[in-house]
Amino acid sequence: MTLADVAAASGVSITTASLVLTGRARELRISPAAEQRVRSTAQELGYRRGTHSARPGLSRTLGLVLDTAEASGPVGDVVKGALEAACRRGFMLLVSESGGDPAVERALVEAMRDRQADGIVFAAAHTRTVAVPDGLRRGPAVLLNATGALPSVVSDEVRGGHSAARLLLEAGHVRGVHLIGAGPGSHGGAAAERLTGLREVFAAAGVWVADAAECPKWTAEEGYAVTADLLRHHRPQALVCLDDRLAFGAYQALADAGLSVPGDVSVLGFGDHPVASWMRPRLTTLAQPHRELGERAVEVLLEVVEGRGARSPVVHRLPMPVRTGGSVAPTCLR
């Protein structure tokens, strides 16, 4: 009998069932009726916490160290995915934020090791290569949205670039394609991998990319400025923005120039940032699978904890699905 069975029979989420059975229902304002229902169901089904441990001696606690924390949005979805995966296996997840400070990262890792956490997920908000704190090497650990000297879970950015390029080719965009967002910046290796994927498919199809504009930062302001400058010299057929926030700025620059999306210019983004759903037309984008990343990181970590997974730096890549909007139109319709 698992926690998931209790949750399903009680008509509540796995997280709610876990909170009730760990004595935190009142603290987090779970209704008395729901609390009683979970407790009664657990008793009827004979559920016992911790009885399905993979091996003796586990604290059934995992740690998640983030370089930034948000209650909602992409980072929030990562945390939700990790929480759900931990709860399904009867583990508690301790979440903490370092603010990107290496000293704080080391202190948090040491604190979780001192509290006998069975394993730690070390996560970055933006894909990058990280220097692994020494404390992470003293037990099971997995990197999330980062690569380094440990097993890691990241989005498959190169294949995301492949998908983006194929989407434009299928719409007939074989000339006048401009890339927005290349160059160095705080976005780490994501830009390079997305560009690699885009260029591989375009090159195989014999398509020449007209231009690749650099954006040191992936912001709406940068997207607007770069697109406005581009329009002074060229009339693009399609814009591939390496981040949805750049695409938001590009929309505004195109509108100021009297051009419509997708009637005059198709626009494609990356990330499935919350802003994408508010753009009109809704932006077509390659999504970061945030919740799935959190879930998979916990699953990989538990494989290491249980002795079924390697501690070597194996990279687990998750696909980036296409979120179809109305921002890409076939060239035959123009």
Image (cartoon, rainbow, N blue to C red):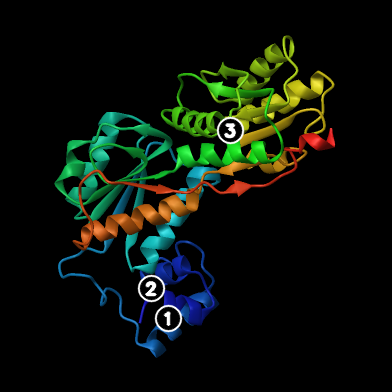
Residue 130: quadrant of the picture: top left
Looking at the picture, tell me which residue is in the foreground, 172 or 53. Answer: 172
- Side of 297 relative to 230 (left or right): left
Tell me, for residue 205, which label it has, or none. 3
Q: Amino acid at mark 1?
A: Arg
Give the CA distance from mark 3 to mark 2: 57 Å
Looking at the picture, tell me which residue is in the foreground, 178 or 86. Answer: 178
Q: Which residue is mark 2?
A: 21
Give the secondary structure at mark 1. helix
Residue 197: % across, % down: 49, 34
Give the CA distance from mark 2 to mark 1: 7 Å
**Mark 2 Cα within 10 Å, few/some/many (few <14, many 20+)?**
some
Give the CA distance from mark 1 to mark 3: 61 Å
Residue 57: % across, % down: 15, 66
Looking at the picture, tell me which residue is in the foreground, 4 or 244. Answer: 244
Is residue 304 in view?
yes
Q: Amino acid at mark 2?
A: Leu
Is residue 273 in view?
no
Q: Which residue is mark 1?
A: 39
Q: Residue at x 67, y 41 (%)?
A: 170
Q: Amino acid at mark 3?
A: Ala
